[in-house]
Image: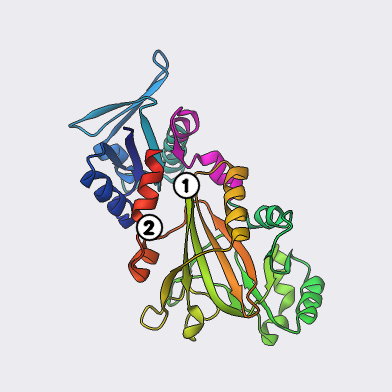
Amino acid sequence: MKNILILTHSEDPHADSVCKYLSERGINTFRVETERLSENYKLTFNSNSLTYSISNGGEEIQIDDSWNIWNRRVMNPDVRKGLPRNITDIIFDESEKAWDGLLMSHKGKVVNRPQNHLYANNKIDQMKFVSRFDSSVLIPDTLVTNDPKKVREFYDKHKGNICFKLHKGAVVESSEGRKTVYTNKVTREQMANANLISSHPCFFQEYVEKDFEVRVVVTDSGHEAIAIHSQNSEISKIDYRKYDFENVPYEPIESSLDVKNVCSEMLKYYGLHFGVFDFIKSKEGKDIFLELNPNGQWLWLEEQSGHDLTSIVANNLLD
């Protein structure tokens, strides 16, 4: 039976749930809360043995091929207040390189290796991959540009029915505090200021009218799809991340064979053992691919749908 090393942080309910599941089944786990590296752990690589070891003050493990690793969330270590920014940056960079050395060179299973996560985490490349399939899975008409003229043409082409999103989720500071940037439909008033996009390429897509949305948790051994009925609420209609749990039902569904094939082949293509996929089921019943998140969140899907996902994620670490 494999040992499981979990690299995460102190406030990670996903890791809590998986650790509980593994512990109840007698699986040996070693959890590292990576932001507390300097305070609670010692990480060592030795070129004589070509192995890593980690100790937490009470236990030390040698990370050989009897260990599988869950690269859940590696965080920057906590640093002393008042350190100069350049020193802090060095600490963060050196810590990241040390963890990357372990995750990239480890001979056992790693879910997922950082180089594969980086390779996979690009919406444009993902869409190009899906477009190779002769299947019923479609991609939305998409434009990435900093050319205002092309955006106006795209807006007119879709009769104003387009949306703006980010390549990568972000939180911005405002006078009203920290705010998450969601997917939003582009208004005619915003198009009047289209010149503002000249500063950097922006991501636009045709807005697909939804029947519901689907989030698919995919591992080496299976697919677990949860339908998110986001259209039941005006709050979550455009972006389900504007959660309205009281009015939006979640339920497990069976994905089409084409969706399963696209997901499995994409995991293989990027060298991943785990990924979370987002799709739209259109009003016409079409499966529309949106994105793959190589380290996506899933626990809230379990909580809202009552469908066990923890065991799927945990057992994938044991293979």
Q: Is residue 14 above or below residue 202?
A: above
Instruction: Give the magenta-colored segment's residue range.
Output: 100-120
Q: Is residue 76 magenta?
A: no
Closer to the chain start, of discs 1 and 2, is 1
Helix, strand or loop at disc 1? Answer: loop
Q: Residue at x 17, y 32 (%)?
A: 58
Q: Nearer the viewer, residue 31 or 84?
A: 31
Left/right of residue 6 with respect to residue 183 in the rendered view: left
Q: Main secondary structure of the magenta part?
A: helix
Return the residue at label 2: 309
The three-letter code of the residue at mark 1 reads Ser
| Residue 302 numbered tag | none
Characterize the local packing of mark 1: few (<14), some (14-19) or many (20 or more) Cα atoms within 10 angstroms: few
Q: Is residue 136 above or below residue 35?
A: below
Q: Residue at x 39, y 50 (%)?
A: 313
Left/right of residue 86 with respect to residue 261 in the rendered view: left
In which image quadrant can residue 95 be found?
top left
Quadrant where the C terminus is found in the figure: top left
Label 1, label 2: how far apart the Cα atoms are: 13 Å
- Residue 129 image point, x, y percent: 69, 52
- Residue 226 image point, x, y percent: 46, 67
- Residue 71 image point, x, y percent: 42, 43
Q: Farthest residue toward the top?
A: 48
Q: Nearer the viewer, residue 132 or 33?
A: 132
Q: Is residue 136 above or below residue 3?
A: below
Return the residue at label 1: 221
The three-letter code of the residue at mark 2 reads Leu
Quadrant where the N terminus is found in the figure: top left
Q: Residue at x 48, y 42 (%)?
A: 112
Q: In this rendering, which labeled residue sits more in front, label 1 or label 2?
A: 1
